[in-house]
Image: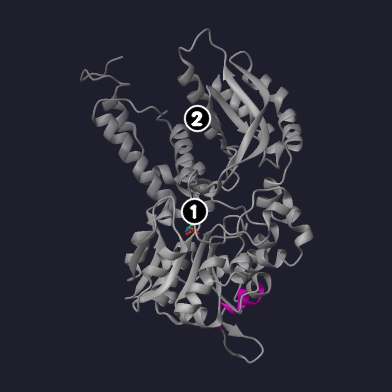
Amino acid sequence: MTSPDGSMVHGPKAMLAKLPSVDRLINLPASQALVTAHGAALVTEQARVLLAEVRQDLLNGSMPAITLDEAGLTQVLQARCMQRLAPRMQRVINLTGTVIHTNLGRAVLPQAAIDHITAMMAGPNNLEYDLASGSRGDRDSIVEGLLCEITGAEAATVVNNNAAAVLLTIAALAREREVVVSRGELVEIGGAFRMPDVMASAGARMVEVGTTNRTHLADYERAITPATAMLMKVHTSNYAVQGFTSAVSEAELAPLARAKGVLLATDLGSGSLVDMSKYGLPKEPTPQEMLAAGCDVVTFSGDKLLGGPQAGLIVGSKAAVTRIRKFPMKRALRLSKLPLAALEATLTLYLQPDRLTEQLPTLRWLTRSRETVAATAQTLLAPFQLALASRYTVQVVELSSQIGSGSLPLDRLPSAGLAIAPVLSGKRGLGTALETLSTALRELPVPIIGRVEDDRLLLDCRCLDDVAQVLDQLANLKAALA
Ligand SMILES: *Cc1c(COP(=O)(O)O)cnc(C)c1O
């Protein structure tokens, strides 16, 4: 159809003339419902942006991919408002097989911690207020007693994360002096946390001793000078030196440190507050063992094996912890009330050690038997087979889970899950088919994250508590793959 001036009636130019103004679009009943729900500012801004985009498309002579009548425009407007308000942080379902997954938020908080956060954040609290005396209090006192009781330390303080704990410890105790550390322990933790750089940032001079594979007590002894402030041990949490190796334990170093009048600190990284071997898991050194061995300071994370919020825990002698607490940098690294509430509730669970494997999600998942995990996988098998129909084969298989977060890097937990393989006549299209499936799983309302290994997509069921949450999404998965 052509108009008298020869332009297309339904072409971009004609559509341009018919486009409503921002005001008109906003005043449509469907838009007014959005205004009632979200306020005029958000809806007007989204309407303005939407119309500007449509106008630009039409001016460029192209038709936008949406229906340009009132119903079409208000529908897109609603979607845009929702999208604008949707949080970037989303819950996901961790079927990667890595229990403490750094990219997926590390430890999942126990319910007690979630409840305590909710109660404490909803109003004012006694964060730094001593209710007994009615005067100013110290936020550390909320968890110091618990930490001392659990680890046997004289004193304790907490900061933002373990990286901060290590930085602060070195800065407070060894600034402008020397710290002796083994070459076998100059670790890099993901995200540019490298021991030599941390030492430099803290203003300490690092003195390396020994070799990559072997360090002896005499190496430390020779390195101690009047400028030495501290001997430092670092738990090699994310790698293992194997073969012809030798390291000096904290228990061996403590007498030397004491005789020479220098401090001994150890960074445990994960550090577990209970002996993991009691649950049949690989042994990790505990802060209590390190203190008993004679360390002045022990640092570890709150959100690795401890199973709590992100935090850096520092336990040790009264003298050392007092210097750390009073060091000005502490103020910049202090723990906020939100993780502090979570940490208090998590540590309280350790006062009931018999119930830990029920109460701490991390420990519950780590201690789950292969049989239990396989039973969960079995309940998923038929529904997945049905949803993936003729395009993929699904099997229950034995798998190996990892603890994760740099803890016990070589140890594997016997696990189980689904192995999904594309139905193809050869290897052609294999990568694409696996990618299509993992993308579809990631794009579900509650994304499911698995791993691709040996030409299959693996869904390790170790950390899966809510089977229904997966089953309820299989219709979406089927639709996405159709
Ligand atoms: C994980 C780790 C850190 C860093 O701890 P964050 O809590 O992530 O800051 C430091 N040292 C070691 C040995 C670690 O394993």
Where is residue 235? Give x, y as percent: 50, 57
Q: Which mark is residue 246?
A: 1
Distance between mark 2 and mark 1 Cα atoms: 46 Å
**In screen coordinates, is 345 left or right of 444?**
right
Q: Looking at the picture, how far across and down is residue 424, in whole percent?
A: 53, 11
Report the predominant secondary structure element of the magenta stretch: helix
Judge the density around disc 1: few (<14), some (14-19), many (≥20) Cα neighbours within 10 Å: some
Callout 1 secondary element: loop
Query: Which numbered disc covers residue 439?
Result: 2
Q: Nearer the viewer, residue 233 or 259?
A: 259
- Of the 4 image quadrants, the one containing the N terminus is top left
Q: Is residue 330 left or right of residue 469?
A: left
Looking at the image, residue 467 sits to the left or right of residue 84; the answer is: right
Q: Residue 142: within the magenta? A: yes
Q: Residue at x 66, y 31 (%)?
A: 417
Q: Residue at x 48, y 74 (%)?
A: 257
Can you name the residue that lies furthest to the left here?
A: 5
Residue 294, by quadrant, is: bottom right
**Where residue 276 sits in the image (x, y, percent)?**
68, 54
Please say if 362 is above or below 415: below
Horizontal side of residue 323 vs 117, given as left or right: left
Res 122 quadrant in image = bottom right
Tell me where the magenta segment starts and ends, as one range: 138-146
Residue 312 visible at all: no
- 2 vs 1, front mark: 1
Residue found at x 23% / y 29%: 60
| Residue 167 highlighted magenta (yes or no) | no
